Image: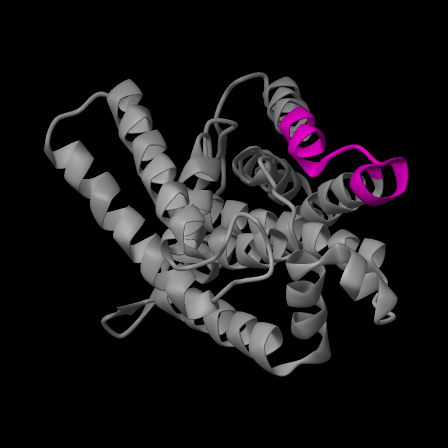
Amino acid sequence: TAMIAIMAIAMTYVLSAGEIDLSVGAVAGLTTVTVALTISVAGPLAGVAVGLLTGIAVGVCNGWLTTRVGIPSFLTTLAMMGIAKGVAMWISGTSAVPILSRSFAWFFGGGSLGIVPILFFWILIFGVWGHIQLKNTGFGRRVLATGGGETAARYTGINVKNVKFQVLVVSGTAAAIAGMLYAGRLQSGRFQLGEGDELSVIAAAVLGGTSLFGGKGTVIGTIVGALMIGMINNGLILMGLEYSQQLIARGGIIILAVALSQRQ
């Protein structure tokens, strides 16, 4: 649930600004591969740097194409989802790349402090940061204003394009961090990791009270939504449903959540 929660916190900003990012799952998978390949050559510190640069680069591309070229974020990130997955398959040869660094594996998902998993602290850090930024800073207010009414926000002096660019970069970076957590926890890089996560991420944000139509978002609600999605996913697995059936169930949850949000 930690990876879903981290990406969903960033997605809260994207949705609140009136945009969407469908590439987060593929970016997480691509990051696991770039990190694993870099660690095998240059060590864990270089791997972390390359992982972050992977997410930032994708976020910058998404933001630039959306705000400067004028392509809707739905289409931009949908195309980027395919590109990221294709690149991950290409550079890995569709094979898993092992990660042998114990320090990286401990810090990114595999370790614990006493009885508390390290993943809990990742959620805590992102949750506190995301909540404070959205509710108590000028940036958060600009994000909500942009999604609530782009024209009105522009007339009040807000650079709407910059706000949307920034939230898409934040989303790409968060997806990269989630990818490193996948890589550390499973001690390997695989292009399949993160596949389909975009459905769970969007569902978590919407279930938590974030509007798909912009102008409304809550990080605490998103974390609760991510926990609910985690419980639902575990329940579907325990019920013995196939992966295809799990996707159908997740899609149904998103439809129900959006319908309730639209009524409100």
Q: Quadrant of residue 75?
A: top right
User: Which residue: 72% across, 78% down?
Assistant: 138
The foreground one among 136 and 94 is: 136
Residue 206 horizontal/vertical position (percent):
42, 51
Residue 24 horizontal/vertical position (percent):
56, 40
User: Which residue: 44% across, 31% down?
Assistant: 196
Magenta-span inclusion, residue 67 = yes
User: Which residue: 38% across, 59% down?
Assistant: 208
Magenta stretch: helix, strand or loop mostly: helix
The foreground one among 20 and 191 is: 20
Q: Which residue range is magenta in the image? A: 65-79
Is residue 163 among what the camera can see? yes
The foreground one among 145 and 83 is: 145
User: Which residue: 32% across, 39% down?
Assistant: 256
Residue 121 horizontal/vertical position (percent):
41, 70
**In this rendering, would 198 be left or right of 43?**
left
